[in-house]
Amino acid sequence: MVGVVLDVTAQRRDEARLRQSEEELRAAFEQAAVGISLVAPDGGWLNVNDRLCEIVGYRKEELLRLRFQDITHADDLASDVAEIDRMLAREIASYSKEKRYIRKDGGSVWVNITVALIWNEDRTPKHFVVIIEDIDARKSAERELGHTREMLRNFLDHLPGLAYIKDQSLRMLHVNRRCRDLLHRDAEQLIGKTSAEIFPGDRGEGVSARDRQVLDSGNSEVVERSYGDSRYQSIRFVIRQNDDPPLLGGITIDVTQRYKLEQRTTALLEINARGGTLPEKEFLACALELAEKLTTSRIGFLHFVNDDQETIELSTWTAGALQSCSAMFDAHYPISQAGIWADCCRESRAVCFNDYAAHPARRGLPDGHAPLQRLISVPVLDEGAVRMIIGVGNKTGPYDDFDVTSVQLIGNDVWNVVRRGRAEADLARRLAEVTELKDQLEQAHLQLLQSEKMSAIGQLAAGVAHELNNPIGFVYSNLGTLAEYVDDLLAIDAAVDRVAQLPAQAGCRRKPAAACSTRFAGSRPRATIRTSSRTCRS
C-alpha cells in the first residue's frame, strides 16, 4: 500500500481566510448604509441588500424577479441603458449618474448610482456591481432651493429697478431682467464678471471701490444721482449667510417720478410763498421762470385774457424767450389772429405740440419771433371763462403728460395768487375810499354839531334880548322924560346964568362962586343923559 501525505495547513488557512472575507463581504453587503446589488448583463437582479429593498419598497424575493429596467423611471431609462451599452462595448469601465426608481407604492425616489462591470476570465461580462445612494431628501431640498431661487428671480425681475448680487470677489452672481435690459446683455455675459469688466475705465473702478467699501464695513449705503433726464436711487447692503462669507446686494430704482413730484411741490409752495411778497409783475416773472425750470424748457410766456374773451393782454415772457425774440407786439392782441399757441384759449383745454414744424395747423411765426420746436400752452379758467394763458416751449426732449399737468397746476396757482392780490388791492382801494368818506362824514357831523350849537346860542341870545327889551324900553321911555326934565333944568340953569350976569352988566359982581357951581353941576347930568339915550336907542 502506498500512501501520500500532503500538508494542507496553508490551504486550510487560505480557505478560512476566504470564508472570513466572504462573511465580512456578506456582512458589509447586507449592513451597508447604501443599496448594493449585483445585476446580470440583461438587467436582472442577481442579489440585492436590505437597504436597496428599503429604498424601492420591495421585498427581496419580489425584487429578484424583476429587472432594473422595470423599476427605472421612464424619463431616465434611455440614458441609463446607453451608459450600460458603452460599458459592454468597453468604452468606459464605470459610470455614475442620478436617476429615479419607481417604488412599489407608485412613488418615485431619486438615487445616485455608481456602476462597475465584472468580467469573466473569457472576457465575457459576468455581472454589474451597482452602488445605490438614496438622494431623495437632497433632491427635495434642491427642488425647494430651486423653487426659492426661482421665486426670488421672478421677484427681482419684477422689481421697478435694477437688482444684483455679488460674491466676495465682487463678481456677479445674479442680475435681474431690468439690469440685463438696461445693459443690453444676456445673463451669461454678466454672471461671473466684475463691474470693472462690465464697465471698463474709471466708472467700473469707482463702482467696484464703493462695493468693496460697503462689503468690508458691513454698513449699507444709499445714494441718489441724476443721469440725463432721469434720477436714480441706489442702495448697497450686505447679505449675511450662516456659514458662508457674506454677499453684496444692490438695488437701483428709478425715482424720476418721485423727484419730479418733489420739485413740482416745491415750486408750487414757492409760488404761494412769494405771492404776497412781490409786486404782480415781478411775481409773474418769478412764477414763469419756475415753470420753465420745472419742465426743463427754454422759453415761457404768460398772458391775460380780457373779459370780452376776444383779446389777449400780453404780459410776461421769460428771459430765454426775450433773448431770442425781437418781434414787436401791441399790448392787446386778438385771439383770432394768434397762432396755435392760443388754441388752448379757443378750445378751453391744454395743448401740447412736440413737433411744431410738422403741425398742420401752424400759422407761422412773426419776423423776429423766437423759433419753436415744442410747445405746451394751457388755459386757466375761472367761472367758465379763460382768464390767463401760460406756456413753455423748446424742451430738449418731448413733453409728456407730467409736464402738461405741472404747467397747468402752476398756472392755476398763479391765477389764484393774482386774483387774490387784485381782490386785496381792490379791497384796500375801497377801504381807503370808505375811510375817506368816513372822515368827510365825521367832519360834516362836527360842522353840523357846531351849527346846531350856534343855532342854540342864537336862540338863547334872542331870548335874552327879548327879556332885556322890556326893561330897556322902559328905561328908554323914562330917559326921554328925564331928558325933557333935564332940558327944563338946563333952561333954568341958563336963566340963572343970565340972571347972574345982570348985576355985572349993572356994575355989580356979587356971588360968582355960587353961579359957577351951578353951571358945573348942570353940565354933567345933561351929557350923561344924552349918552344913555343913544345907547338905549341902539
Image: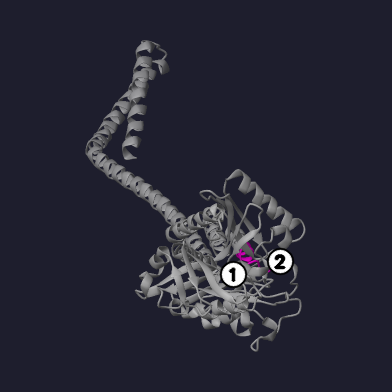
The reply to whether dot 2 and dot 1 touch (C-beta < 8 Å) is: no
Secondary structure of residue under mark 2: helix
Q: CA distance from mark 2 to mark 1?
A: 79 Å
- The residue carrying mark 1 is 95
- Say above or below: 344 vs 136: below
Secondary structure of residue under mark 1: strand
Spot the residue most to the front: 1
Three-letter code, disc 1: Tyr
- Say above or below: 358 vs 490: below
Residue 19 location, x and y as percent? 48, 57
- The residue carrying mark 2 is 320
Regarding residue 25, the answer to whether it shows in the image is: yes
The magenta stretch is: 288-301
On screen, residue 71 versus residue 355, left or right, reads left
Residue 418 location, x and y as percent? 52, 63
Quarter of the figure with the C terminus: top left
On screen, residue 477 versus residue 421, left or right, reads left
Residue 524 location, x and y as percent? 36, 23
